[in-house]
């Protein structure tokens, strides 16, 4: 009898769900909108109903489903599935694991969404099942997951691996969503890069980014990489600044956990080698030579599927 896992990646606008086989292949995936009204109280019900409906036409029985592995953007007690806080969803002190378990009558395991993506990339993506891995997602924010000695790190109260909130500018940094200032996220996210570029424009530097912004109304990280590729000095500055700071931060992290793979994902990583090359240089400059020898930078491969595949891995890890 073939067994299946359910992966669930709960985001601020949509919930990605998937039936996944024991070897990590997606049999079926779908999305439902995230109902954040009333502090997200309807979400488990919506998920449960949607899973139930899909099971009807799935071609296998509920008995073949081993459990649900769910990720949410927030601080989570992974033992119990208790969500201390998930700001984008509206949950505070929310018993997600228990509620979803009661509704579905299935084992439920909950993890932070970025940690889940790290597990997914390590299982079926570019991680290649290593024991020590750093995963960094550079999107509108900066997410992170750390696998050390084969286990994802959660820490004392669910805040381990929040790489985006490492302070990289101690004085005068931009405010971050977490309430601090100068976090990595304020520099190395798409939003952060745009802010750095806009500062250069406002300082009166000569850059084609100014024209791009006037024409399009907005500036994107992609514009900055494209301008840098065309030798725009200010755009190159921004890319190098980001790579310098990110590379140093990763080098410092790498001294703690000595990763063999450093997986870079998220929208900003679509720049590929244009980002990886200066990032490697910065990393090499700041890492211990022996740490550097072990570490390989790779691009994430699973894209938006990393979370649901990580969810399946979470179930597999718990029940085999
Ligand atoms: Zn922060």
Image (cartoon, grey):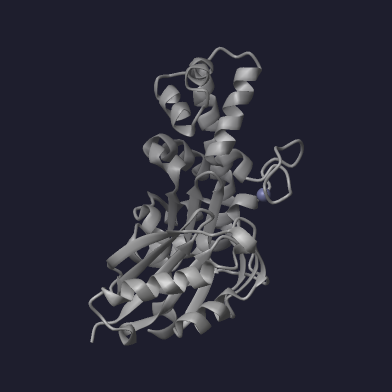
Quadrant (top left/top right/bottom left/bottom right) for the N terminus:
bottom left
Quarter of the picture containing the C terminus is bottom left
Q: Is residue 244 left or right of residue 273?
A: right
Spot occupied by residue 35 in the image (x, y as percentages of width and height): 54, 60
The residue lying toward the viewer, choosing from 48 and 198, is: 48
**Residue 106: quadrant of the picture:** bottom left
Up/down of 204 relative to 225, above or below: above
Question: Horizontal placement of 121 versus 73: left or right?
Answer: left
Question: Which residue is found at the position 60% from the left and 29% from the top?
Answer: 196
Residue 291, visible in the rendered structure:
yes
Give the farthest residue toward the right: 171
Give coordinates of residue 63: x percent, y percent.
33, 87
Position in image of residue 2 (x %, y %):
24, 82
Which of these two is toward me, 264 or 13? 13
Camera-nearest residue between 128 and 226: 226
Give the residue at x 55% y 43%. 246
Number of numbered discs overlaid on the protein picture:
0
Examine the rendering and report whether any part of residue 148 can be seen.
no
Query: Left or right: 225 with respect to 81?
Result: left
* Residue positioned 59% across, 64% down in the render: 40
Instruction: Give the x, y percent position of residue 77.
Output: 62, 74
The answer to which of 95 and 314 lies nearer the viewer is 95
Picture layout, residue 172 above or below residue 98 = above
């Amino acid at each position: 009898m073939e067994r299946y896992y359910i992966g669930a990646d709960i985001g601020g606008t949509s919930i990605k769900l998937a039936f996944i086989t024991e070897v990590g292949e997606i049999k079926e995936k779908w999305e439902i909108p995230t109902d954040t009204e009333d502090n997200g109280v309807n979400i488990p019900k919506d998920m449960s109903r949607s899973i139930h409906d899909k099971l009807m036409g799935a071609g296998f029985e509920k008995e073949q489903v081993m459990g649900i592995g769910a990720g949410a953007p927030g601080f989570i007690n992974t033992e119990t599935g208790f969500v201390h806080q998930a700001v984008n969803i509206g949950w505070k002190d929310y018993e997600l694991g228990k509620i979803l378990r009661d509704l579905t009558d299935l084992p439920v395991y909950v993890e932070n969404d970025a940690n889940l993506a790290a597990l997914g990339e390590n299982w079926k993506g570019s991680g290649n099942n290593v024991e020590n891995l750093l995963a960094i997602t550079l999107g509108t924010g900066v997410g992170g997951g750390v696998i050390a000695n084969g286990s994802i790190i959660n820490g004392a109260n669910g805040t381990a691996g929040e790489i985006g909130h490492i302070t990289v500018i101690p004085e005068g940094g931009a405010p971050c969503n977490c309430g601090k200032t100068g976090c990595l996220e304020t520099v190395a996210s798409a939003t952060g890069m745009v802010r750095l570029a806009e500062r250069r424009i406002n300082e009166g530097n000569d850059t084609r980014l100014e024209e791009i912004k006037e024409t399009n109304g907005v500036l994107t990280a992609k514009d900055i990489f494209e301008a840098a590729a065309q030798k725009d000095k200010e755009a190159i500055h921004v890319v190098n600044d980001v790579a310098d700071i990110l590379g140093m931060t990763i080098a410092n992290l790498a001294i703690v956990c000595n990763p063999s793979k450093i997986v870079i994902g998220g929208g900003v990583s679509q720049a590929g080698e244009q980002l990886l090359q200066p990032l490697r240089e910065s990393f090499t400059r700041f890492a211990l030579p022996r740490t550097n020898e072990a570490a390989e930078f790779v691009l994430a491969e699973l894209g938006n599927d990393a979370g649901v595949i990580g969810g399946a891995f979470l179930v597999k890890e718990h029940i085999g």
